[in-house]
Image (spheres, helix red, strand yellow):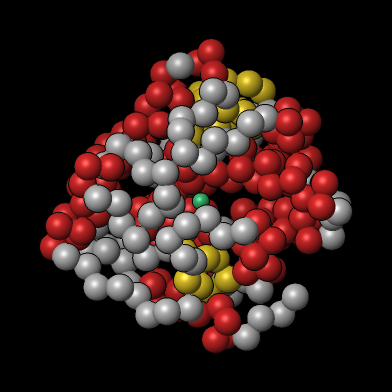
């Protein structure tokens, strides 16, 4: 389904306080320390291309133009809540990645149930600069939009347990892959520490697992390399 630029653009970005900028700065400093030796190589490849300002909150239009130049994708405005899955995937089909303009409050530093700016820009956007990763996004989007209602629930779950909350094995180590883990200091540390929550990734396992948007998860699926995600979505 094609959408007009006006449909996708949404309201103008809100104004931020110095406290908001400070939250961003502290989140970046803290999280970079946490993931320094554990984030996968692909993440760092994307992160370098993003060139995030570590002191000031990102400006959506500017980052959107940068992403457009890099890979032909743009950012669109999501409300401060989860979009309905079908709306979410229609944005993706249009090569628009929906981002919120909300930044967590200082008391929610470790974990915010709502996706915020830190989640979008630090967790997701590094990946979204990588054509190899975007191919997976395109495959999942195509599969979702071409599926029946019942299968759509399964595809959403697979997205959730890979793109949002997946782990990945690289060089023999379990590393954060999902944007929800990369952007949540609290859940990331718990997910890596409690290895009894790790389950080898299978499509069926991820399809049947219980997504928990408002709490830490009981299990995390470990991809055996990015190649596994490529293999299981081949033909989608
Ligand atoms: Fe997300």
**Is residue 169 shown to the viewer in this render?**
no
Q: How many marks?
A: 0
Q: Is residue 191 above or below residue 85?
A: above
Q: Residue at position x 74%, y 35% from top?
A: 207
The residue closer to the viewer here, 202 or 115, is: 115
Left or right: where does residue 76 sit relative to residue 15? right
Q: Residue at position x 42%, y 44% from top?
A: 113
**Is residue 64 shown to the viewer in this render?**
yes
Q: Residue at position x 47%, y 71% from top?
A: 77
The quadrant holding residue 117 is bottom left
**Residue 55 at what x, y percent from top left?**
19, 59
Q: Is residue 32 above or below residue 137?
A: above
The residue closer to the viewer here, 63 or 70, is: 63
Q: Residue at position x 20%, y 59% from top?
A: 20
The quadrant holding residue 86 is bottom right
Q: Is residue 88 above or below residue 229?
A: below
**Residue 16 at what x, y percent from top left?**
22, 68
The residue closer to the viewer here, 217 or 141, is: 217
**Residue 233 at what x, y percent from top left?**
78, 46
Q: Is residue 175 above or below residue 197?
A: below
**Residue 63 at what x, y percent from top left?**
40, 71
Q: Residue lying furthest left in this view?
A: 18
| Quarter of the picture holding the N terminus | bottom right
């Amino acid at each position: 389904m094609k959408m007009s630029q006006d449909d996708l653009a949404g309201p103008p970005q809100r104004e931020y306080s110095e406290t908001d900028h400070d939250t961003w700065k502290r989140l970046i400093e803290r999280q970079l320390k946490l993931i320094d030796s554990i984030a996968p190589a692909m993440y760092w490849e994307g992160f370098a291309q993003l060139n995030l300002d570590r002191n000031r909150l990102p400006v959506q239009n500017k980052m959107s133009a940068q992403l457009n130049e890099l890979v032909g994708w743009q950012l669109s405005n999501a409300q401060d809540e989860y979009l309905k899955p079908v709306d979410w995937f229609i944005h993706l089909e249009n090569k628009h990645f929906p981002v919120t303009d909300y930044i967590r409050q200082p008391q929610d530093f470790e974990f915010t149930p709502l996706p915020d700016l830190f989640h979008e820009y630090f967790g997701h956007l590094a990946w979204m600069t990588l054509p190899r990763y975007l191919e997976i996004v395109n495959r999942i989007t195509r599969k979702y939009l071409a599926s029946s209602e019942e299968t759509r629930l399964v595809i959403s779950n697979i997205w959730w347990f890979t793109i949002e909350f997946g782990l990945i094995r690289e060089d023999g180590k379990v590393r954060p892959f999902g944007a929800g883990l990369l952007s949540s200091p609290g859940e990331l540390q718990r997910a890596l520490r409690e290895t009894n929550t790790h389950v080898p990734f299978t499509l069926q396992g991820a399809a049947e697992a219980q997504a928990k948007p408002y709490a830490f998860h009981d299990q995390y699926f470990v991809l055996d390399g990015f190649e596994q995600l490529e293999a299981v979505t081949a033909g989608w």
